[in-house]
Image: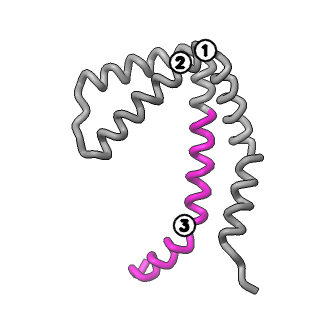
Amino acid sequence: MSTNVYDYAYELEKALRTSEEYVGLKQMYDMVENDPEAKAMFDEFRQIQMQLQQKQMAGEDISEDEVKQAQLVANRVQTNELVTKLMDAEQRMSMAISELNKIIMKPLEELYGSMNGQ
């Protein structure tokens, strides 16, 4: 009997959508989206975050002014309870996905680990 890993992947997607981490993240995201002040802060924070990541990926230097601006926005964001809770929920979801990735990659780690004499 052959198993289709894609079927399992779709089952995993369904499980993620009903997980405590995702449900909490979606709830906090919806709350931020419905609060104009929180939404503006979060959008500004995400925009700066993406700009800095793009520069890093392109191998460009990030200026001291950009770092200061990012810190100011991050400090401001931390004063908004909704945004802070959303960011906490994002962190929990990220940790869950990281753990799932470790589980998924285990066969390859074992294979290549055994090839290296480990």
Question: Mark 2: which amino acid?
Answer: Ala
Task: Measure how far apart labels 2 and 3 are at the Cα level.
Answer: 38 Å
Is residue 2 rendered to the left or right of residue 63?
A: right
Question: Mark 1: which amino acid?
Answer: Pro
- Circle 3 residue: 105
- Asked if disc 1 and disc 2 are in contact, CB closer than 8 Å, the reply is yes
Q: Is residue 77 magenta?
A: no
The residue range painted magenta reads: 89-118
- Determine the image quadrant of residue 20: top right
37 lies above or below 65: above
Q: Residue at x 70, y 59 (%)?
A: 12
Is residue 26 rendered to the left or right of residue 73?
A: right
Name the mark nearer the viewer: 2 or 3.
2
First reached walking from the N terminus: tag 3 or tag 1:
1
Q: Residue at x 54, y 66 (%)?
A: 105
- Circle 2 residue: 40
